[in-house]
Image: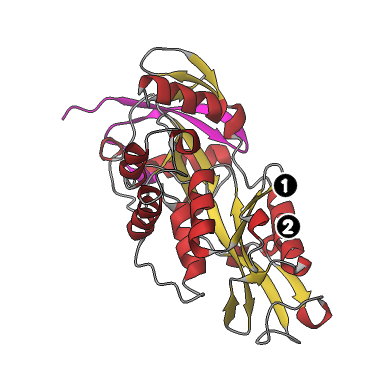
Amino acid sequence: MASYNFVLKCTTEKGRFTLTDLNSDSTVEDLKFSLARLSQIEAGTMDFLNSSSYPPRALNIERNSMKLHELNINSGDTLIVRKRKEPENIPCQIQELNIEAARNSVDDIIRNQSGIMIRHVVPSDNSCLFASVRYILSFTGEIINNNQELRRIIAGVVENNLEKYNFAFLGKNNSDYCEWIQDPVHWGGAIELSIVSGRYKVEIVVIDTSSLITLRFGESEDYQNRIFLIYDGVHYDPLVMECEGHIQALFPSNDPGPLEMAMEIAREARASRQYTDIANFSVTCGICNVSLRGQDEMRAHAKLTGHNQFGEQ
């Protein structure tokens, strides 16, 4: 195959720019090196999302020798380049709390001890929500073998309650949704979190790092326990408490201490701009050239037309 120029538009915390010095025979290592010079992100700590498709897709960049034409991108695509979240290397993601001093301590095992809330990083792929939920449930005795199994569980709940999970609730026919959610390229969101909350009888608190807004699923059901997820606009991670080797993933719903600890992690993440503002991206449909703004317009256009190739303006 003849080599050809490989132009990539990139969005980073340092701004937006276009790479023009690559070709189809350039490697992932070449791409990382070029981006490191411009973004000031170390090559070994980068995460890439291809935002020219909807939803944006994480790219597997672990093999440095891979050629760009083998990667799931095309010349002209737009990449979101972020610093990979490594909680053990980011002190701002850990907030200490003396459990003895906290009101309504989370459980007898960690009472009277010093615990920390941590962000457990799951893979940046289309199933991060499902991986986050699975990780948390694994500490409650619920064994779900993989993300696809959780997708099937959700589909089963929906399929067995046609009255509740109708077109108005799902935005598509019940059977179409069940097929759609089991496709591993599709992201999970509010609908799936509401279903998981009801299925496992637990309140789910999602903290958005860009706005510090908390979204609560199952709050009106008076569930005794809650779990925490953090969301950066593209990616979900679970928040859990660690105390002397013990992981606490389930917290009493009436305990304000863990919620404040989770909020502190989110505040620190926001202060260090660990979020992706996809709500305000200006994009163009690569198929019909319609100009769109943000995730909502991209979603609506994709649903209406079936188009799924987008490029940043």
Residue 251 lies, in percent from the top left, at 65, 71
Q: Nearer the viewer, residue 181 or 48?
A: 181
The one nearer the camera, 148 or 123, is 148
Q: Position of residue 296 (x, y in %)?
A: 54, 28
Decide: is 51 above or below 192. Answer: above
How packed mark 2 is, by other alpha carbons closer than 10 Å (few <14, some 14-19, many 20 or more), is many
Q: Which label is found at residue 212? A: 1
> Is residue 121 shown left or right of residue 101?
left
The residue at 52%/51% (across/down) is 193
Category of crowding for the residue at label 1, using alpha-carbon neighbours closer than 10 angstroms: few (below 14), some (14–19), many (at least 20): some
Badge 2 marks a residue whose secondary structure is helix
Rendering coords of residue 16 (x, y %): 57, 29
Magenta stretch: residue 16 in it?
yes
Secondary structure state at the residue bearing disc 1: loop
| In the rendered image, the vertical position of residue 160 relative to residue 119, given as above or below | above
The circle drawn on residue 69 is: none
Quadrant hosting residue 25:
top left
**Which callout, 2 or 1, points at the residue further toward the start of the chain?**
1
Q: Nearer the viewer, residue 140 or 237?
A: 140
Residue type, numbered disc 1? Leu
Q: Quadrant of the N terminus?
A: top left
Marks 2,1: beta carbons within 8 A: yes
Which residue shows up at 77% across the image and 68% down it?
257
Q: Position of residue 220 (x, y in %)?
A: 67, 54
Q: Amino acid at mark 2?
A: Met
Stretch of the chain drawn in magenta: 1-29
Left or right placement of residue 133 versus residue 275 in this view: left
Q: Nearer the viewer, residue 130 or 60?
A: 130
Vertical position of residue 32 compared to residue 104: above or below: above
- Regarding residue 84, the answer to whether it shows in the image is no
* Image mark for residue 263: 2
Q: So how many labels did they put on this image?
A: 2
